[in-house]
Amino acid sequence: MKLLNGLGLGTFPFASPFTKVDKESAKKIVATFIEHGGKYIDTSPTYAFGDVEVLLGEILKQINRDSFFINSSCGFVRNGDKYVKSGKYNDVIKECEDSLTRLGLNELDLYISHTPDTETGAPFSETIAALEELKKQGKIKAIGVSNVNLDQLKEYNESNSIQFIQNRFSLLNQNFNEKFVNYCQENEIGIIAFQVIERGLLTEKFINTKTEFDEGDLRNRKPEFEYNVRKVITQWVKSEIYPISVKYNIPISALAIKWALSKEYISLCQCGATNVNQVYSNLKAVSDEALEAIYEIDISYNRLTSSLMQKYKKSVISFMGISIEDTLKGSATGK
């Protein structure tokens, strides 16, 4: 099932993990997204220690409530200058109430457990019980989980309460296997994909420049942005994906999103933006144009797969240093 128009706005970039996004820029990004048909907005209390939720609260109070669908998450609690995992009942309840206060809302459209609690000893059933209570109280409309494998999803869903999952997925990170997809479809669980444009790797950003990141840029710590890895992936994007982008007159980011949305099991692609132009580019993914490009993208991806296997004896995911389990760690730094 597709959720809304298929494209969501992730607000992690508003915490400035990549480049600086000031308050006015954030306002313009949200306004542009809404004005051009976007609706789903994702946030989290872990983004800049709740400051992004506060900022969104200021922005959204100027927008008709029926014009947006908003999701936030639980699963972490603040401990000084860091976050630690917790899916304990009382922590889940409190985190939701705090998020609602910061956002200036009475109800969230979707509330997601950000990551499985593997540290406090609280069973998944305790987390779900809290989410079910929040739904009963009318503080959330739908329940979801994030960064889960199939066994974890099944355990979370023992009471059949899960309506959505939110996991990392992209053209370069095709990590959903048939069993996972089948379970979601059989249980009517929608899959929301995040990191679909791979923090800029699947855009025009790097194909003609030797971009160096600022010291505080999150990408400095990510294996897929290690220089030699990025060089290979960027060259593939430049030689294989960029010509498709030119041929169909659609941005690379929109092609990447359109490819993901072409999968029947993907309900929505959640993408962040650091400026208004990126919003315009991403929105082009939800048009009915250039659908034939999907076939060409798959052929190009197969060539990348063959090349990496021949040269490095590695799959695309392994070459990028992001094993399937790595994609499920669910750090508090964002999506």
Image: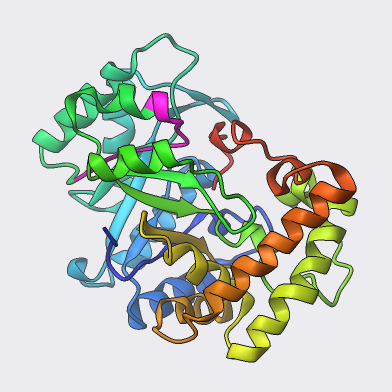
Q: Residue 310 or 263: which is nearer the viewer?
A: 310
Q: Residue 188 or 308: which is nearer the viewer?
A: 308
Question: Does residue 300 appear in the picture of this structure?
Answer: yes
Q: Could you tell me which residue is drawn at 65 percent across and 68 percent down? A: 299
- Residue 235, given in percent of the width and then of the height, sits at 83, 68
In what quadrant of the picture does the N terminus appear?
bottom left
Which picture quadrant has residue 189?
top left
Q: Is residue 292 left or right of residue 89?
A: right
Residue 181 painted magenta: no
Q: Is residue 295 left or right of residue 103?
A: right
Q: Is residue 273 above or below residue 194?
A: below
Q: Is residue 149 above or below residue 199?
A: above
Q: Which residues are magenta?
A: 142-152
Q: Is residue 232 left or right of residue 182?
A: right
Q: Could you tell me which residue is drawn at 36 percent across and 67 percent down? A: 6
- Residue 244, given in percent of the width and then of the height, sits at 66, 82
Residue 151 painted magenta: yes
Q: Is residue 205 above or below residue 15?
A: below
Question: Does residue 214 appear in the picture of this structure?
Answer: no
- Residue 334, given in percent of the width and then of the height, sits at 55, 45
- Residue 88, given in percent of the width and then of the height, sits at 34, 18
Q: Could you tell me which residue is drawn at 42 percent across and 8 percent down? A: 121
